[in-house]
Amino acid sequence: MINIPRGTQDILPKDSYKWQYIENKLHELMKIYNYKEIRTPIFESTDLFSRGVGDSTDVVQKEMYTFKDKGDRSLTLRPEGTASVVRSFIENKMQGNANQPVKLYYTGPMFRYERKQKGRYRQFVQFGVEAIGSENPAIDVEIIAMLVHIYQSFGLKNLKLVINSIGDAESRADYSKALQEHFEPVIDTFCQDCQNRLYTNPMRILDCKVDRDKEAVKNAPKITEYLNDYSRSYFEEVKTLLDEIGIEYEIDSNLVRGLDYYTHTAFEVMSNAEGFGAITTLCGGGRYNGLLELLDGPKETGIGFALSIERLLLALEAEGIEIEQEDSIDLFIATMGEQADHYSVELLNKLRLAGISCDKDYLSRKLKGQMKQADRLNAAYTIVIGEDELQKEQVEVKNMKTGESEPVAFSELENYLKVES
Ligand code: HAM
């Protein structure tokens, strides 16, 4: 038997309706915020991620599914969506659009070769949002408010919004130097990854999964002490606007995010729900002011976030929030005899074309078995067609809820069901 690849999952009908519900709701919410959908390829040139996401990140160093195609091009299954959206923005010259900032959203599978764990998969579905073309604290706040709104609209309560500023390039350079000086004397006691990060990306030491609880991490210099005037005032404005619209947050100066492109505002939403699991991060995002230029694009800036639908579902489960399944059909057609069965094919087809959801038996079940099938399918109405009905061109339509029946002519069935159901 061939099994499903590690870290992936089949979404079976008992769960797929939840995904549809979530995706539909997200589409609706995006209308409210005036964001438009973008769809980009599942694979991209490997360079896009090594340059965009950053060579020193775990994602690029350890987690990418990279392969050569038959034309010897190095391609990578996308590990995230921001680099692709930015590539598309640049390639399609969206900076020329009259409507700026360009507000985009996407949903689709992402791929990371990670250690499988509850809430961590090798293929997972991200819903992400990017607003490109405005450097204004108000758009940062729009994105954060939208994120909180999304989770709340699914009924989640145990949420914690954590924000930080990781400043602009100048602030980050000063801060990185301070971190190097701070960690240098003790780096021997850190994991090999952190030892490598000391000179390539010292900020990543702060959220290393292995060394996160070390004293030296806890008392490391804080980015907030190294923000230059512009970065500081940008962050102040973001906080003021969040306060004004009543969004609660915590500031975590060790929140540095795992991808290289971030500048200024960074944020994550965590679940506090008991039983959510070891991974508490529901989603993450931030501003990326240098990314477009890094990818040979215009001098525009962006901000966005991504959440995984898998973790949203886990959070709903942890808070005991159920998504109801609308699992019913309008009509089940039971038949007795070959002629009736033959006619039911025609009737079924006619009713379906008229938009009525209906089904019939395909396993030559006895009448009792057919009625059981009607029950299992939650049919609102049932009809039984036999010789008599064929002759009279009329059936008894049984309302399965009340148990009452009414005679209806075949020619009137469509109208009857449309009015009644
Ligand atoms: P990220 O923090 O790498 O950011 O991922 C965002 C979210 O994707 C995570 O918070 C989590 O919900 C989900 N996620 C990541 N890896 C996995 C996994 N292995 N299994 C399940 N879920 C996962 C980004 O990807 C950025 N592109 C977000 C962004 C958009 N920043 C600006 N714009």
Image (cartoon, helix red, strand yellow):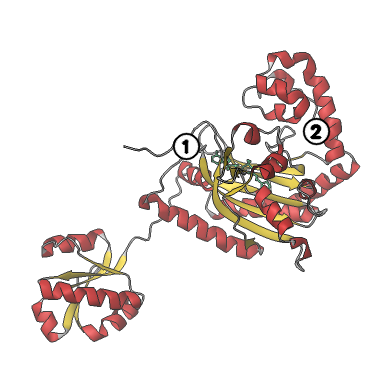
Quadrant location, the C terminus = bottom left
Q: Which residue is mark 2?
A: 223
Quadrant location, the N terminus = top left
Residue reaching furthest to the front: 71
Please, what is the three-letter code of the amino acid marked with disc 2? Answer: Ile
On screen, residue 76 versus residue 355, left or right, reads right
- In this view, the residue in front, 304 or 111, is 111
Circle 1 Cα neighbour tier, 10 Å, few/some/many (<14 / 14–19 / ≥20)? some
Please, what is the three-letter code of the amino acid marked with disc 1? Answer: Gly
Q: Residue at x 76, y 63 (%)?
A: 100
Residue 271 visible? The answer is: no
The percent position of residue 170, horizontal first and vertical second, equals 87, 38
Q: In terms of sequence position, does the residue under pointer 2 or pointer 1 come before the other?
A: 1
Above or below, 358 against 47 in this view is below
Q: Which residue is mark 1?
A: 7
Residue 129 visible? The answer is: yes
The percent position of residue 216, horizontal first and vertical second, equals 74, 19
The percent position of residue 268, horizontal first and vertical second, equals 65, 42
- Is the C-beta of the residue carrying label 2 under 8 Å from the nearest atom of ligand 1? no
Q: Residue at x 36, y 53 (%)?
A: 13
Above or below, 219 against 309 in this view is above
- Is the C-beta of the residue carrying label 1 under 8 Å from the nearest atom of ligand 1? yes
- In this view, the residue in front, 381 or 71, is 71
Q: Residue at x 72, y 32 (%)?
A: 254
SS at mark 1 in the image? loop
On screen, residue 403 versus residue 302, left or right, reads left
Above or below, 391 against 2 in this view is below
Report the Cα–Cα distance between label 2 and label 1. 35 Å
Q: Residue at x 44, y 53 (%)?
A: 18
Quarter of the rendered structure image containing ligand 1: top right
Q: Quarter of the image holding residue 392?
A: bottom left
